[in-house]
Image (spheres, helix red, strand yellow):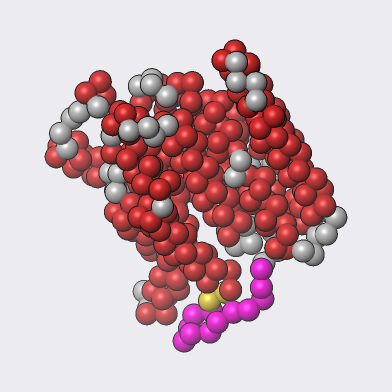
Amino acid sequence: MTIDIALWLTQDAVTNGAVYALLALALVLVYTVTRVIFVPQGEFISFAALSLATLQAGKVPGTVYLLIAGGALVALLDGAAAFRSGHLRRLFGIGLLNIGLPALVAAAAWFAAQRPDNLWLQMLVTLAIVTPFGPIIYRLAFQPLAEMSVLVLLIVAVAVHYLLTGLGLVFFGGEGLRSSPWSDFSLHVGVLNITAQSLWVIFSSFVLIFALWLLFERTLYGKALRATAINRVGARLVGISAAFAGSLSFTLAALIGAIAGILISPITTIYYDTGFLISLKGFVGAIIGGMVSYPLAAAGALLVGFLESFSSFWWSAFKESIVFTLIIPVLLWRSLTTRHIEEDDE
């Protein structure tokens, strides 16, 4: 291997590792707050990338209809609960949030589809379509089971993953899609040709990580999430709603997944099931961080990016196997060094 090839592989590793780091942080966030190993995290990537490409083709993506249906189901559940408890004044707010906003997003999607050259409008609409899936999925699938065991929550997460993957196939078909690049600019540094999209991926990842740090350190909502992650029972005793914390963590995870999908959609062709494999690599990074440490998870994700990139040079056919094999020694080491805690003792 020459130094030029090593530099190219390093560039590829940093770009991929930045995306994996975002997904690792989202997985750690959801797990620490809700105990859900969020298998469908990758579907946010696929939905965002394919929705953006569909809007650029001048069509309204099928995810819009899923958003309307999901919002209607949440409105039905929350409306029935408000009616039974006698809080009739909440009905208007529930309808506005769960039916009015999705209808507004649908109108924006139709408007954006008529303007295929307005990339920034399409990206904003894509975020507006995909991000609400986080709280909707939490409300429909996980909030009613919040007190169940981690195993039960994992089984539900796998079921949600298969449901969303199937819906992705229905909405977008089996053919892959790729959106237009944001810019034709490229930076030449020695032998490296760094595209604007790669720079956007790295820059956006750092901005998001910094924004998450600000959220957790400087805002009341972030501190509420941290309190829930440290001790759910204690957080409830001081008035932090577990349902609100869960919904907020899923919203952030969906936002991170949607941004990651938008960032990589001009770099690689995305299929309806591509997001799962990408999120699995973020999961390896999260495992290296013990599913609790954000810095270690981000570092582990970068390690995955380097391992994948350099193994593709020497053992291209086995690069996926090599990446996922990394999880075995980490799990063995943690199983031998971590004190086992029964869930009932939390």
Q: Nearer the viewer, residue 301 or 38?
A: 38
Task: Residue at 46% x, 86% y: name it.
Answer: 190
Q: Residue furthest right?
A: 114
Task: Residue at 85% x, 55% y: name it.
Answer: 114
Q: Position of residue 74 (x, y in %)?
A: 63, 26
Task: Residue at 70% x, 52% y: name it.
Answer: 125
**What residue span does the magenta drawing correspond to?**
182-193
In the picture, measured across the screen, residue 122 lies left or right of residue 21, that is right
Q: Is residue 152 visible?
A: yes
In the picture, measured across the screen, residue 285 lies left or right of residue 59, that is left
Q: Nearer the viewer, residue 290 or 143?
A: 143
Q: Nearer the viewer, residue 61 or 3?
A: 61
Q: Position of residue 337 (x, y in %)?
A: 14, 39
Q: Quadrant of residue 315?
A: bottom left
Task: Locate the C terminus by quadrant.
Answer: top left
Q: Position of residue 153 (x, y in %)?
A: 42, 25
Task: Locate the N terminus by quadrant.
Answer: bottom left
Task: Reply yes or no: does residue 99 show up in magenta.
Answer: no
In the picture, measured across the screen, residue 303 lies left or right of residue 312, that is left
Compared to 326, does 302 lie above or below? below
Q: Position of residue 228 (x, y in %)?
A: 34, 37
Task: Residue at 63% x, 79% y: name it.
Answer: 185
Numbered disc total:
0
Compared to 113, does 233 lie above or below? above
In the picture, measured across the screen, residue 268 lies left or right of residue 311, that is right
